[in-house]
Image (tube, rainbow, N blue to C red):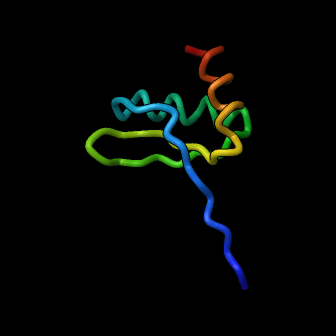
Amino acid sequence: MKTTKISLIDVFSGSPWEVVLIKSLLEKANVQTKVKDEAEMRVAVPSESYTLAMKVLANRI
């Protein structure tokens, strides 16, 4: 069985409470998210959802 690797693009980085807020906004718009906890917390979305994610964020922030 062949698996496909999904490319993720970071769309936001910030404090833990900001990341939770952004993640919630995106998920309400049916955009899959992944939180990365590196030097700072980040929210990433699949590359095919990037445009929608940026539209959601532009209208909410």
Residue pictured at 26% horizontal, 43% vertical = 39
- From this view, report whether residue 17 is shown above or below residue 2: above
Give x and y (percent) for residue 11: 52, 33
Pick the front one: 21 or 45: 45
On-image quarter of the N terminus: bottom right
User: Horizontal placement of 6 versus 19: left or right?
Assistant: right
47, 12: nearer the viewer:
47
Quarter placement of the C terminus: top right
Left or right, 52 with reference to 23 = right
Q: Is residue 7 left or right of residue 49?
A: left
Task: Determine the residue positioned at 36% across, 40% down.
Answer: 41
Q: Toward which corner of the image does residue 52 lie, by quadrant?
A: top right
Identify the residue shown where x is 47% and y is 34%: 20
Q: Is residue 33 above or below residue 61?
A: below
Q: Position of residue 23 (x, y in %)?
A: 55, 36
Image x and y of residue 7, in percent: 59, 54
For the view shown, which residue lies furthest in the left direction? 39
Along the horizontal axis of the image, is 37 left or right of 33?
left
How many numbered markers are drawn? 0
Q: Residue at x 40, y 32 (%)?
A: 13
User: Where's residue 53, x and y in %?
Assistant: 65, 31
